[in-house]
Image: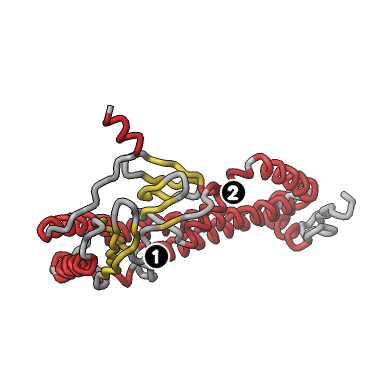
Amino acid sequence: MTGPTTVLAADDGAGVADCADYWLCQEVYDWSGMDWLAENAETLIATPARILLIVVLAAGLRLLAHRAIGRLTDRTATGAMPTILRPFRSRTPAAEEVIDQITARRTQRAEAIGSVLRSFASMVIMGIAVVLVLGELGINLAPILASAGVVGVALGFGAQNLVKDFIAGIGIILEDQYGVGDVVDLGEAIGTVEAVGLRITRLRDVNGVVWYVRNGEVLRVGNKSQGFAQVVIDMPVAHDTDLERCRAVMQEVADAMYAEDEWAGILLAEPESLGVEQITAEGVFLRLTVRTTNAAQWRVGRELRMRLKERFVAEGIRTPVPLLSASGAGAGSR
């Protein structure tokens, strides 16, 4: 047998010659004693072995990457990493619902980030492995890469809204713009966030309506639940009211509430009665502000309004009487 890659076997089994990989061909011939197997040792043995090695290494790297990402996200979910809401936990030891919301938010954010990282790691590792395997098979990668580029451009134009949603979702999660339990204003929808995904955000408004908002359509976010909340109460009184006395009464009511043990962990700063905020034809509005935890801001506001109204009645402070419009007066005279 002749040729640059032909195996030449001696009659006495001395070995082979003129082989592309002489050592491999020689070993295969010594082991099997078959010329055709020695001739094709590169194709039948070496190439499959290299492909198998590439696949095993890729699977091992993918497993290690997923395990490392899993440990990272587990530390985030269990609170090993700092969160923006942790400084207020010491002021609210009894607010278990607040802690539950923080935990749920941190867990979902960690799971979403872990899912993105695992998908990215798998795509990169398996992509490199596929390219290496195709190279071992002797396939020309240039036309394939060119075709993949054209297909990618076409898919990019066709699914640009979907890509926009995913990119925006990744930004929302990584930047921690909002999370589970936050009360947010997304423009068309205002409510409590129930789930944050890579493509959509689900929230429920005060009427119980569930809204599904595409992340790519979120142009601005008003988060009412990050850090602390400021409860602002404007109480209307009649024009002839002793405003200084009224302001002092409002301060007394708020200070009494601040001193109670039930509200000590919820009210984060001493209330401030700021005085006259607005004067209209109907009456005078006096403003009271108090800083609270974000989860209790609505409960604090309702309690303060009820106490102020009861105290106003006890002190004889009159609220303004609504003015009748000209059209309403005319209709009544008829």
Given the image, on which type of amino acid does mark 2 rest? Answer: Lys
- Residue at x 44% of width, y 56% of height: 222
Label 1 is placed on what type of residue?
Thr
Q: Residue at x 54, y 47 (%)?
A: 217
Of residues 98 and 226, the one drawn nearer to the viewer in this rendering = 226
Residue 97 lies, with reference to residue 194, above or below; the image says below
**SS state under label 1:** helix
Farthest-out residue, left: 314
Other residues around mark 1 within 10 Å, as few (<14) / some (14–19) / many (≥20): some
Q: Position of residue 26 (x, y in %)?
A: 75, 59
Secondary structure of the residue carrying tag 2 is helix
Image quarter where the C terminus lies is top left
Q: Position of residue 278 (x, y in %)?
A: 35, 60
Instruction: Report the front residue among 225 and 95.
Output: 225
Q: Which mark is residue 164?
A: 2
Q: Which residue is mark 1?
A: 76
Which of pointers 1 and 2 lies earlier in the amino acid sequence?
A: 1
- Rounded to the nearest angstrom, the CA distance separating label 1 from label 2 is 26 Å
